[in-house]
Amino acid sequence: EAADIILLEKNLMVLEEGVIQGRRTFSNMLKYIRMTASSNFGNVFSVLVASAFLPFLPMLPLQLLVQNLLYDISQIAIPFDNVDEELVRKPLKWNPADIGRFMVFFGPISSIFDLSCFALMWYVFDARTPADQGLFQSGWFVVGLLTQTLIVHMIRTPKLPFLQSIAAPPLLLMTGLIMAIGVALPMSPLAGYFKLQALPAGYWPFLVAILFGYAVLTTALKKLYIRRYGWQ
């Protein structure tokens, strides 16, 4: 009888661990869907707005493909990410309506800073003609990739990123590596293959300001979203 009790306890522990791992897997899956949906929504909106006013494409198809490929590579580590303990204490639900609401709520945030980048390249760096489109496209390529990658950390948790909740080392490594590649690519020997070009020194302080503003606004709106709709 004692052996049966011990065996039952072990089975219950295995079952409990399986449930917890299942919730963690589901939570990480939701992270990926939310991040990808909101990022793509913002990118499409930015391209539509820019295409209506610019005398050239805001980014070439090849550049968009490279940007999306790099972003997708950074997402490879999401299955290995940490999940906040609060998110595995109760069952999670698949709610398509929540995905759509999340996409519409957070997607336009990136567009705000995309438009800021467009204004920066147009008014500050005078990239206004088809002859200067390489500079314009390079500026947005870097901003777009870095904001897309930064959002991984901003919305992977309802907590304050990097302080209250830190991503797992594989995700930190992959996102950091992709951001470094994005910054280096326009200045690398490969830039010509992708129609990119080196950015002026004055661009980089503006980039830091854009990323900081993006992080602050996303954090503020995330708190608003949680108060209104909750988080799972």
Image (spheres, rainbow, N blue to C red):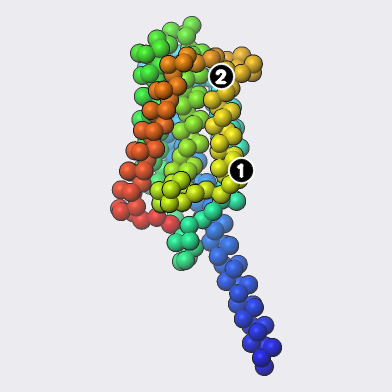
Give the secondary structure at mark 1: helix
Q: Residue furthest right?
A: 3
Q: Position of residue 126 (x, y in %)?
A: 40, 9
Observer-side mark, 1 or 2, equals 2
Give the secondary structure at mark 2: helix
In this image, 82 relative to 128: left or right?
right
Q: Position of residue 194 (x, y in %)?
A: 60, 18
Question: How many tags in the picture?
Answer: 2
Q: 203 or 103: which is nearer to us?
A: 203
**Circle 1 is placed at which residue position?**
76
Q: Position of residue 39 (x, y in %)?
A: 46, 37
At a point 43% along the width and 7% down the height, the residue shown is: 129
Q: Is residue 57 visible?
A: no
At a point 46% along the width and 39% down the height, the residue shown is: 151
* Image vertical order of residue 192 relative to residue 102, above or below: above
In this image, 2 relative to 53: left or right?
right
- Residue 55 placement: quadrant: top left
Crowding at dot 1, Cα within 10 Å, few <14 / some 14-19 / many 20+, comes out as: some
Q: 57 or 27: which is nearer to us?
A: 27
Q: Quadrant of the C terminus?
A: bottom left
Between disc 1 and disc 2, whose residue precedes? 1
Kind of residue sitting beneath label 1: Ile
At a point 58% along the width and 47% down the height, the residue shown is: 169
Crowding at dot 2, Cα within 10 Å, few <14 / some 14-19 / many 20+, comes out as: many
Q: Quadrant of the N terminus?
A: bottom right
Q: Are marks 1 and 2 in contact (CB under 8 Å)?
A: no
